[in-house]
Image (cartoon, rainbow, N blue to C red):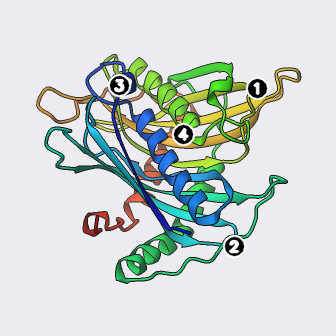
Amino acid sequence: MSDRITLRFLAAPSDTAVDGASIQAGRVLEWIDKAGYACAVGFSSSYCVTAYVGNVHFTRPILPGNLIEARARIIHTGRTSMHVLVTVDAADAREGVFAPATHCILIFVAIDENKKPREIPHWSPSNAEDAMLAAGATLRIEARAEIHAAMRAQEYTDAATTPRTLFRFLAAPGDANWAGNAHGGTVMRWIDEAAGTCAMSWSRERALAVYSGGIHFYRPIHIGHIVEVEARLIHTGPRSMHLGIHVRSGDPRTGILELTTQCMSVFVVPGEDGRAASIAPLDLQSAEDVRLDEHARQLVAMRRALKAMPVEALSA
């Protein structure tokens, strides 16, 4: 039983964003989910499902052909759940000098043969580094619950006037995991694609994800079911666009769709000077527009209050 794993591979041209210059954020989210899943399964000796992905900051672009190192390690366990820290570094394959690209915490739940949560071995820190990470994970539990409650309390209706994008399709066999449902990483890629499309509809320029967080998975998406991914622009900063994304799915024979996933994402437009370009402010016309704009500001403040995980100090 191991509590950590490292994956290494090359970023492929097929992983690039629409500009062809850098790797799509949604693809990086898929890599994060795969590394976290492999770590959780290896530790629990059980099939696992993604329950949460939080605070993914894309700190630098990843280029096609870069050598990728995705490291995942257990940093906290509950009775059936595992908190997994994943760091992604990238390097020019010719030089092999890695630099941080992103990191985040994922929560996986172990599942038995009846698709019910099952107990897992208890994990305890074995050194000072483990203890530091475990303390960071524990501190985030309450804060994460408060952020989640704030997100779930919001209502998104047709009373809003801000831009939104809706993707609708069937979950295909190629999207399946070992249990016959859509991969958590695939769902995150769908989220990034819908959010990016919505952001570009407002900016009219190429937009890149710099943050994705509060990704909660409530129920699986079955292959052959209808999937709706709705992204709505709810707040603009001087140089940023904040979007709320909801994924719903259901049996096409009934047409009843249920919420499966929700999150928040932030996009920017790359400027010629290396900084994010200015963004036109949203015109908040309805009471719902104003409420969701304030909600986005509240989430920014709540996340700023969180102490950063000390990933720069981690040993290789």
Residue 16 has which mark?
3
Who comes first in sequence, dot 2 or dot 3? 3
Q: Is residue 126 visible?
A: yes
Residue kind at label 4, given as amino acid type:
Gly
Q: Quadrant of residue 171?
A: top right
Q: CA distance from mark 4 to mark 3?
A: 16 Å
What separation in Å lies between label 2 and label 3 (alpha carbons)? 39 Å
Q: Position of residue 159 (x, y in %)?
A: 64, 27
Residue 181 relative to residue 149: left or right: right
Give whichever of discs 1 and 3 has the lower sequence position. 3
Counting residues from the start of the chain, the first of labels 2 and 1 encountered is 2
Q: Of the two numbered discs 4 and 1 on the same chain, state the one appearing first in sequence.
A: 4
Residue for point 13% across, 43% down: 95
Location of residue 86 by image quarter: bottom left
Residue type at numbered disc 3: Thr
The front one of 257 and 123 is 123
CA separation in Å, label 4 and label 1: 17 Å
The residue positioned farthest toward the front in the image shown: 1
Q: Is residue 38 above or below residue 311?
A: above
Find out whether the residues at labels 2 and 3 contact each other: C-beta distance under 8 Å. no
Vertical placement of 55 versus 242: above or below?
below
The residue where tag 4 is placed is 185
Residue at image point 54% right, 24% down: 164
Relative side of 269 to 132, left or right:
left
Residue on which the image places disc 1: 225
Q: Is residue 30 above or below residue 98?
A: above
> Where residue 57 sits in the image (x, y, percent)?
36, 48
Name the spot of residue 310 as percent of width and height, x first.
31, 68
Q: CA distance from mark 1 to mark 3?
A: 27 Å
Quickly name the residue at label 2.
Answer: 79
Q: Position of residue 260 (x, y in %)?
A: 69, 40
Task: Give the mark, 4 or 3, whose residue is nearer the N terminus.
Answer: 3
